[in-house]
């Protein structure tokens, strides 16, 4: 996956914080996906403006961890196959 790609949520999907679930959820016409903390943090940055590289750099700074590229790219590939992002 290119670090220059600028992923965004696919049409028909909406990300929101759900207090009852105590988690971010991905809503779509057929249902809802409860996201773990990492997935929620990645998807809330998928705005079509930030590149994959920028998303990784921001997460590394926020969580004071390095080398998150592989994990972020792996998740985004899964999200792309699920058609959550484009």
Image (cartoon, rainbow, N blue to C red):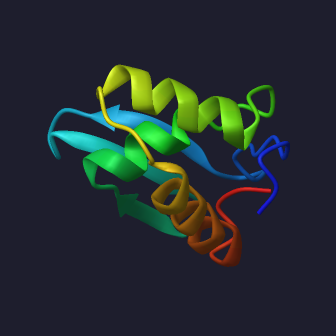
Report the number of discs.
Answer: 0
Image vertical order of residue 14 relative to residue 45, above or below: below
x then y, percent, for residue 47: 71, 31
Q: Nearer the viewer, residue 58 or 8?
A: 58
The residue drawn where x is 45% and y is 47% is 67
x then y, percent, for residue 9: 69, 47
Q: Is 4 displayed left or right of 34 in the figure?
A: right
x then y, percent, for residue 66: 39, 39
Image vertical order of residue 2 relative to residue 9, above or below: below
Q: Is residue 25 visible?
A: yes
Residue 73 position by quadrant: bottom right
Q: Is residue 29 visible?
A: no
The residue drawn where x is 80% and y is 26% is 49
Q: Is 86 displayed left or right of 71 in the figure?
A: right
Residue 65 position by quadrant: top left
The residue drawn where x is 27% and y is 54% is 36
Image vertical order of residue 6 relative to residue 11, above or below: above
């Amino acid at each position: 996956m290119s670090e220059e790609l600028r992923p965004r949520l696919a049409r028909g999907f909406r990300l929101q914080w759900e207090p009852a679930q105590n988690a971010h959820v991905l809503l779509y016409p057929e249902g809802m996906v409860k996201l773990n903390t990492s997935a929620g943090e990645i998807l809330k940055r998928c705005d079509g403006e930030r590149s994959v590289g920028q998303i990784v750099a921001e997460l590394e700074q926020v969580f004071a961890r390095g080398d998150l590229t592989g994990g972020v790219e792996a998740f985004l590939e899964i999200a792309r196959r699920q058609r959550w992002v484009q």
